[in-house]
Image (spheres, grey):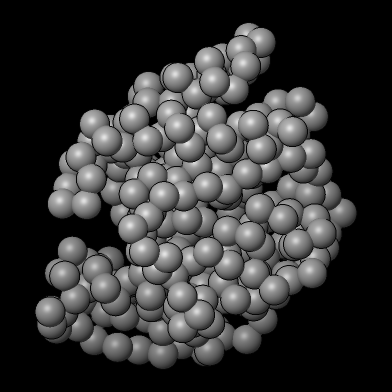
Amino acid sequence: MIPASFDYVRVPSIEDAVVALSADPEAKILAGGHSLLPAMKLRVARPTTLIDIARIEGLSYIREETDHIAIGALTRHHDMATSELLHASVPIASFAAAQIGDPAVRHVGTLGGSIAHGDPAGDMPSVLLALGATFVATGVGSVTRTIAADDLFTGLFETALSSHEVLTEIRVPRAIDGWSFLKFNRRAQDWALVGVSAVRVEGHVRVALTNMGLTPLRATAVEQALMGGADPATAAAHAHEGTAPPDDAFASAEYRRALVKVLVERALEEAIE
């Protein structure tokens, strides 16, 4: 497929990116391109301008802060997968990054790009939702604001980022007692038919689902059942509640509702144990 025509501009700074975004409400940010470009080829996305931020310095890092790990938006999936800091402090993030696509994708795709794209079938959005991450957006005049993970994903390929903001940093908590990341796909490099991310912190478990709705979803019914004393199997029986999985050529909605219960039970057992 051939994408619709568009203009291309490469910017040297976040400030210039924000100016370019403000000048064209239909513009899109281009980072690694592995999320946006396939959508453009299918004409699911039709930006009038691509604003290339891939060469902006200072946006690729993984560093330890007082109460969280800060990850720059241009950090590649490969860098996350091989980060000793993430492996020691937030292992679910490094483990999930290592499962994305194939080596070619991981060496080019960025964390910020996968998040800002807002694809409900992506791996990292549900991981960060389960972690309760915080996202830093930079807008006009270099003004920043933070967005909680529960508030970021608003619709299919839609986020709470405004049309003149750039995602610049992702902050993930370090205090994790247990975790699990599971996904079911036909081939290793395929999108997950269903995915589950579970994180246990101080006895409370947060569960997020991949490809079970128009956005990454919190499995709130599962979490509430666990808080009420349910065992993993009983809690997992509620995994389909509140979901609206797609019904496509790869799997039916009914199949996904059955599959998510199996994966959630396994993820809960792993995260709790």
Residue 71 point in image, percent of width and height? 67, 65
Q: Is residue 208 left or right of residue 83?
A: left
- In-front residue for pair 205/53: 205
For this orientation, the residue located farthest to the top is: 228
- In-front residue for pair 159/265: 265
Question: Picture quarter containing residue 62?
Answer: bottom right
Q: Residue at x 50, y 42 (%)?
A: 196
Q: Residue at x 49, y 66 (%)?
A: 100
Residue 96 in the image: above or below residue 251: below
Q: Residue at x 64, y 69 (%)?
A: 81
Residue 89 point in image, percent of width and height? 80, 55
Residue 117 in the image: above or below residue 173: below
Residue 196 in the image: above or below residue 239: below
Q: Residue at x 55, y 43 (%)?
A: 197
Work out which quarter of the rendered image holds the N terminus and state it. Answer: bottom left
- In-front residue for pair 183/244: 183
Residue 6 in the image: above or below residue 174: below
